[in-house]
Amino acid sequence: MAPIQVTVRYMTGEPACELEADDETTVHTLAAAVGDVVKQPVFAIRLMLPGSPGGGTATRVLSPHEVVKEVGVRSEGAAVEARLALELQLVVVGPLGEASKLLQELTKAMNRKFNLPTARIPDRHVEPIASKQVQEVLDATAAIVYGERGGTFPDDVSAWIEILERSPEGEHVSDHGLFRLRRSDLSTAVTAMHGGAIEHLLYLSMVMQNEITVFFVDITGELAKVFGREPAPSGVWVATVTEQAFRIPNMFSVAFWQEVQDSKHLDVASQPICVAPDLSSFFRLMLQQGDAPRRSYSTD
């Protein structure tokens, strides 16, 4: 079968690259090839099938797991060689690209610190995750965090949830000390010794040594208000708790931390401190310091 000629253009119409593919080539593989040309990680690449000029069909964002034969390839005439062609549009999603690079650097640095090997899977060989699957995780987590009132994650949070779902490095993120994030926890309700979501908050890690260290994201800014800070969403906080915290009915809720602030549970939990303004800053500090940050972040 003759190869399919794939022309990729930016939304402005400016050409990005031309590639060859076959019917079974995945959109993910195409995106990796495009990323090589435009110098971007595969997860930053969004490929779209343009809509019809008359508006009969809308532009469609392609899912990485789709294969070329499923995305509207048509023959260019009935010539003997009958070469097929596909035109796609390209958007580079900067926050996803930056998160992907940072996660790779962080994984290598943490492993190097403890003399552990790092097996880097080339972008084109990463198992593609359907966009529907990623959206289901985002929706499930948002349903817990925002409840019936609904809401949309800050861009930084959305980008990191997506990267953690799509990237092989996202399965388990650890400083091999007091921070251990499991991506399988992200879309579930928080439970004892596991991360997860609760109204307003997303718990990233719970690790026990002499006490339990918890890292969590103040998604809505409600926790910041409890502790007299500007209610900016997506700040990352850290606190320590004892096992007694798991016996308190509203454990790890904003109401629980309000009670800590009111000195009701000082034998159970320390007052949490904000260590970073967002997840990207948190992981960047973790990369620079060699472990998860625990010093207060100042907005001054």
Image: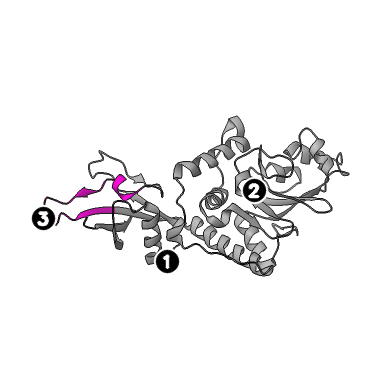
Asked if the magenta segment contains residue 76, the reply would be yes
Frontmost of labels 1 and 2 is: 1
Give the number of the disc on residue 80: 3
Residue 151 sits above or below residue 298 on the image: above
Residue marked by disc 2? 232
The C terminus lies in quadrant: bottom right
Give the residue drawn at x 30%, y 53%. 88
Dot 1 or dot 2: first in sequence order is 1
Label 3: how many residues lie within 10 Å, few (<14), some (14-19) or many (20+)?
Answer: few
Dot 3 or dot 2: first in sequence order is 3
Residue marked by disc 1? 39
Farthest front residue in view:
1
Q: Magenta stretch?
A: 67-87
Give the number of the disc on residue 231: none
158 sits to left or right of 6? right
**Marks 1,2: beta carbons within 8 A:** no
33 sits to left or right of 127? left
Q: Secondary structure under badge 1?
A: loop
Frontmost of labels 3 and 1 is: 3
